[in-house]
Amino acid sequence: MINPEGDHIQRILAVLHENISHSNQLQQSFMEHQAQVLQTIAADIGFSNQSVSTTYSPQPVLTRTQLEEFGTGSIAKCFGPDFKILDQRKSPRIPNGDLLMIDRVLKISGKRGNLNPPASITTEFGIPKDIWFINQNTYPGSPLGVLMEIALQPSGILSAYLGTSLMIPADVNLFRNLDGTISFISCPSLLGKTVTNHSWLLSSVSAGGMVIQKFAFELSTGGSVFLAGESSFGYFRQADMDRQTGLDVGEKTQPGHFGGTNRYDYLRVEFASIFPQGDASTKPYLDLIDRLYLKENGGKYGLGVIIGEKELTGNEWFYENHFFQDPVMPGSLGIEAIIQGLWAYAKYFQKDTNFHNPLIDFSFNEPLYWKYRGQVIPANREIKFEILLKTKYISDSSIKLAGDADFWVDDVRIYTIQNISMKLSEG
């Protein structure tokens, strides 16, 4: 039996795949938008430019209080009375509480009711010295998963501001990140600094009532861009997400040849033995791994394999913060678990490496790439990942690891990640 709606979804995903496959245009987009960034900086310090039509105001367009309303309260109190209808039904939201990585929206542009470019947003997020994700991080600096949230969250606000949810059927009310790329220009210390996000809409594709939107983004601090990327998001029906088939069309799989007697080829390590939990009263927000299985060498590239597992209860903290009426684990935390696996591998096999002023860098010769084709919800009971190392350098003064990874929930492979990397060096 032919399913027209299913055909629509397949066509949307085909277009999406083509767009992501041509992300070599990222550098061109990056350069084209440096002018906008520089114009904003010039306005901040008082220089005028007669050719610039935009203006800068120190007053935010949207405050933290308004964004919190978007997260768990009245959407109309954030965007205005035109959005009152969304308060009466389940509607896409942004993260809330400790997962809301935006303090204010400085500028936002685009024509409401028009889902085509141009449209853009500029936001700020301050990182105080006592913030939870710095204190709880197992490695120096800001967690990779948090940087992804800071980079991606403004896209959801811009999409909502344009009125996307007002233009699609009421039952198309789930907003999901699908895939993307990030290039790290540098990895500065962000402690005590303000991160500025500039994001802009690249395209919108509609079919069967659903919408796929692609955005580009840059993160900067002190006027210097340190991260740039592109990412795609989709609006879906609950029924579509309930039919989760993952990357293997419903087939249940295990990492590589892991399982049965093959487990004896791996060294089992309790994550807490490498990174003690410390004060049990602290919120274990970044407690993302229970067990590790390590191979110092071997795997697809011959340089090592890392497998991590985590049992879930359904009461994890992030469900309350992501999202209101639609609890789902952020994909960024899945990627954060993977980067923790890289760090644990380095610490376990090089216990004597000492750094007086360690610096972490996530840059690699290729952009970080991710694809999500499934979700983790409170009904799920186990997540796991596998990293196949393809770059490995460990010495007394530096560590560099990079690899490709996959991520499972209840034996369904739902994420694939390429070029995830970590470099540790003396500051």
Image (cartoon, rainbow, N blue to C red):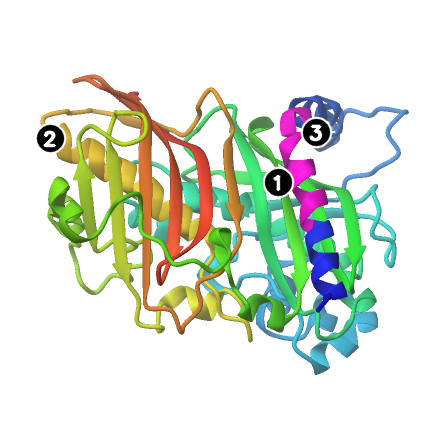
Indicate the amino acid at tag 3. Val
Report the quarter where the C terminus lies: top left
Q: Residues within 10 Å of mark 2 (few under 14, many from 20)?
A: few
Q: Are marks 3 and 2 in contact (CB under 8 Å)?
A: no
Indicate the amino acid at tag 2. Lys
Query: Which residue is painted at 57% across and 52% down in the image?
Result: 102
Q: Is residue 16 magenta?
A: yes
Q: Residue furthest bottom?
A: 88
Query: Which residue is painted at 34% across and 40% down in the image?
Result: 339
User: Which numbered disc covers residue 351?
Assistant: 2
Residue at image mark 1: 197
Which is closer to the viewer, label 3 or label 2?
Answer: 2
Report the quarter where the N terminus lies: bottom right
Residue at image mark 3: 37
**Residue 61 can be seen in this image:** no
Front residue (pair 22, 49): 22
Q: Where does the image place residue 138, in percent across and percent down from the top left?
A: 26, 43
**Which residues, given as a range, are shown in magenta?**
13-25
- Cα separation, mark 3 vs mark 1, equals 10 Å
- Cα separation, mark 2 vs mark 1, equals 37 Å
Sequence-wise first label, 2 or 1: 1
Left or right relative to 281: residue 232: right
Q: Residues within 10 Å of mark 1 (few under 14, many from 20)?
A: many
